[in-house]
Image (tube, helix red, strand yellow):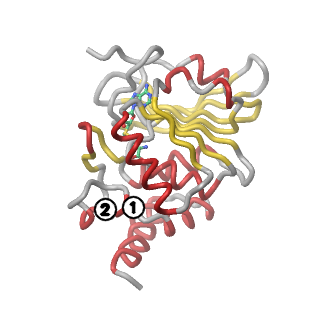
Amino acid sequence: MTDYARLRDQMVDRQIAGRGIRDARVLAAMRTVPRECFVREGMEEFAYKDAALPIEQDQTISQPYIVALMLEAAEVQPGARVLEVGAGSGYAAALLSRLADRVFAIERHDALGLLAKERMAALGYANVEIRVGDGTRGLPPEAPFDAILVAAGAPAVPEALRTQLKVGGHLIVPVGGPGRQRLCKITRKSADRYVERDLGAVMFVPLIGEQGWRED
Ligand code: SAM
């Protein structure tokens, strides 16, 4: 076993399962996807730390536990079609690719989108499509989705994302001001009925776009 595989197992045991994540498919995916391939060059030794890490374009790769919490809450089943908004390094999209049939992930920075694409190709995660653009609008040509995960903090739940959920689908989105948000789970119950659950406090970079924060 390589050092990274041992560190990855320790991460899952201590930071993820140890904090109450129980979904066996999420735990298995996290034991498989090499987080060291998604951090900035030179930061590989910190890949399994219990923390978010800086990546290119002044963005972050989220803390592993928060990624696991979002994945479990999204209840992604085999065969699912999933959208991630805020692909960043591509790590969460790579995990989603182990859980779902098809994954679409949108990133607003070209440079990050390109890196994430290269990583998916290198690792052979062929069911992930990385797009560059404003993810607050969702991805209407590919909708509806069984699950939508938003990896940046929104001022309010983007209406476009809500309406691109299938009935029975889940939208996981941090909502609140810069620096501190509440992680919300929104489940579509029917064409026009949604229920919302609060999953706790989180800290994400801002979601910037038409249905997010303004750039300045
Ligand atoms: N999921 C990522 C990972 O696994 O590395 C972490 C993402 S990082 C916390 C949030 C990302 O959201 C940043 O890369 C940022 O550029 C991106 N972002 C912010 N607003 C966006 C938008 N409207 N559309 C797409 N991406 C956006």
At x 36% / y 47%, what residue is drawn? 62
Q: Tell me if 74 is positioned left or right of 191 in this view.
A: left
Q: Nearer the viewer, residue 58 or 125?
A: 125
Indicate the quadrant where residue 47 lies.
bottom left
* On-image quarter of the C terminus: top left
Q: Tag 2's secondary structure?
A: loop
Q: Secondary structure at mark 1?
A: helix
Residue, disc 1: 35
Callout 2–callout 1 Cβ contact below 8 Å: yes
Q: Quadrant of the N terminus?
A: bottom left
- Above/below status of 107 relative to 9: above
- The x, y position of residue 161, in whole percent, is 59, 24
Question: Could you tell whether 153 is left or right of 193 in the image?
Answer: left
Residue at the image position 55 percent from the left and 63 percent from the top: 29
> Residue 169: x and y, percent?
70, 35
How far apart are labels 2 and 1 at the CA level? 6 Å
Q: Cβ(mark 1) to ligand 1 < 8 Å?
A: no
Say which amino acid is labelled 2: Ala
Q: Nearer the viewer, residue 46 or 179?
A: 46
Residue 58 placed where, x, y %? 24, 37
Name the image quarter holding residue 154.
Answer: top left
Pointer 2 or 1: first along the chain: 1
Looking at the rendered structure, which numbered label has been put on residue 47?
Answer: 2
